[in-house]
């Protein structure tokens, strides 16, 4: 999986935001067996994919990805998806790999927070979650 992640990572780092928004629509997660849990995960992935697509194709994409809430939301989405996928068998998890590569791209672009209060609130929330 690390080889695939590094390949996606290179592709995402080289791509502009419009290309990345298109990539969000391409990647899937395939399940070994269809059940209620896998259907729930697929539904959440479709919603996440659509939201990422819409935000990254925006004219104001630089402002959107520089927000701490976007960054922390992406981290929380990855954590939740990893937890869900640990409960079901998958044959492909390209979308999760794509999200991790997107997170690295945002880090590379140097996350800048324009609203100090927003940064403080979000990071205080993350700190409390880490202490629990």
Image: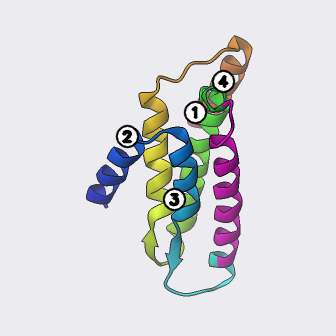
Q: Is residue 52 above or below residue 127?
A: below
The picture quadrant where one finds residue 2 is bottom left
Instruction: Single out the mark in the foreground, 1 or 2.
Output: 2
User: What residue appears at the point 45 percent right and 64 percent down from the top-left corner?
Assistant: 94
* Residue carrying label 4: 124
Residue 61 % position (x, y): 63, 33
Q: Which mark is residue 51?
A: none
Q: Mark 3 or mark 2: which comes first in sequence?
A: 2
Q: Is residue 43 above or below residue 50?
A: below
Label 4 Cα neighbours within 10 Å, binned few <14 / some 14-19 / many ≥20: few
Helix, strand or loop at disc 2? helix
* Residue carrying label 1: 131
Magenta segment range? 39-60
Q: Mark 3 or mark 1: which comes first in sequence?
A: 3
Instruction: Single out the mark in the foreground, 1 or 4.
Output: 4
* Residue carrying label 3: 82
Residue 21 % position (x, y): 58, 49
Q: Mark 4 or mark 2: which comes first in sequence?
A: 2
Are the residues tagged 4 and 2 within 8 Å (C-beta)?
no
In the picture, the quarter occupied by the N terminus is bottom left
Q: Mark 1 or mark 2: which comes first in sequence?
A: 2
Q: Is residue 46 above or below residue 33?
A: above
Judged from this view, the residue extending furthest toward the left is 3
């Amino acid at each position: 999986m690390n080889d695939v992640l590094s390949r996606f990572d290179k592709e995402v780092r080289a791509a502009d935001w419009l290309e990345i928004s298109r990539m969000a629509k391409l990647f899937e997660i395939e399940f070994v067996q269809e059940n209620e849990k896998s259907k729930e995960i697929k539904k959440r992935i479709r919603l996440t994919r659509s939201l990422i697509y819409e935000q990254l194709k925006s004219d104001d994409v630089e402002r959107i990805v520089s927000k701490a809430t976007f960054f922390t939301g992406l981290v929380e989405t990855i954590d939740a998806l990893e937890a869900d996928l640990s409960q079901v068998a998958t044959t492909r998890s390209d979308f999760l790999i794509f999200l991790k590569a997107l997170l690295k791209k945002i880090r590379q672009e140097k996350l800048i927070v324009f609203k100090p209060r927003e940064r403080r609130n979000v990071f205080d929330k993350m700190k409390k979650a880490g202490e629990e």
